[in-house]
Amino acid sequence: MSKTPQYQRVLLKCSGEALLGNQQYGIDVETVSRIAKDISAAHAMGVEVCVVVGGGNIFRGISGTAKGMDRSSADYMGMLATVMNALALQNAIEALGMHSRVLSAIPMSAVCEPYIRRRAERHLEKGRIVIFAAGTGNPYFTTDTAAALRAAEMKCNALLKGTNVDGVYDKDPRLHADAERYDTLSHLDVLAKDLKVMDAAAISLARENKIPILVFSIQEEGAFARVLKKEGCFTEVV
């Protein structure tokens, strides 16, 4: 395998749960700092990195509806949670001496920039790490769909999905000892087998735009940089 990165520009999708550490909710500063170091290592290899971060560690949209809350309101609250996570990640990245920008799909000029595609591209060209917040800015769309959308808009060579397990399995490896990990899958396999990699809208968007999805464990230090060199454990959806 080549030791150089296989991609020039990538989008990292980091779930809100990945920022929990050992807590039940909220943001674990040490975990955010470790993820920032992983992003820094990838950036040091010359890869242009943009990030979409979820909000599940602070607020879960669907759980809100279950308790009788309007789905749109719950989703907007979830989007605001992603802005908090994005600011935490930006702080950790800049503490390492790198430049980053948070661009939000919901304009909030006091804390971050509004999402403008050409502005985001310019930031990437200048070597800044771009963090996309507030999902797509619309209710009923997940941050996974936002990640696929931004990856397409930014013309990324790959979408890397950082999760709590080291790839895609036929069943939950945390519950089933006999779960088998896939090395490669097609986008259609994921849809046909209803594998819970990302939601169907995100998979379809990635498929239409021929964006490979690499699923790996963001809990393993240095895994992000390794996957960019096609090393370590991951599942590739192509």
Image: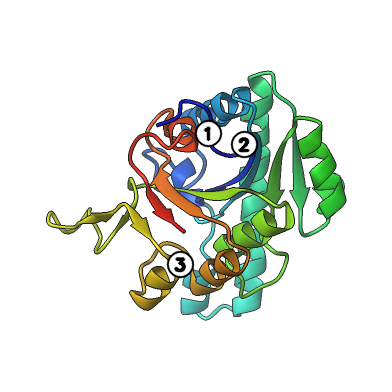
* Tag nearer the camera, 3 or 2: 3
Query: In which image quadrant can residue 227 be found?
Result: top left
N-term-proximal mark, 1 vs 3: 1
* Tag nearer the camera, 1 or 3: 3
Vertical side of 6 occupied by 202: above or below: below
Helix, strand or loop at label 2? It is helix
Residue 152 in sight here: yes
Image spot of residue 80 (x, y percent): 67, 56
N-term-proximal mark, 2 vs 1: 1
Q: In this orientation, which residue lies closer to the viewer: 238 or 44?
A: 238
Q: Disc 1 designates what residue?
A: 32
Direction front: furthest residue: 1
Please give the name of the residue rendered at 57% of the width and 49% of the height, measured from the top-left corner: 158
Q: Amino acid at mark 3?
A: His
Image spot of residue 88 (x, y percent): 63, 37
Q: Disc 2 designates what residue?
A: 89
Q: CA distance from mark 3 to mark 2?
A: 30 Å
Helix, strand or loop at label 1? It is helix
Q: Which mark, by number, is residue 187? A: 3
Please give the name of the residue rendered at 43% of the width and 40% of the height, measured from the top-left corner: 218
Within 10 Å of disc 3 (Cα), the crowding (few <14, some 14-19, many 20+) is many
Vertical side of 90 occupied by 12: above or below: below
Query: In which image quadrant can residue 23 be found?
Result: top left
The answer to whether the residues at label 2 and label 1 have Cβ atoms under 8 Å apart is: yes
Q: CA distance from mark 2 to mark 1?
A: 6 Å
Image spot of residue 188 (x, y percent): 43, 72
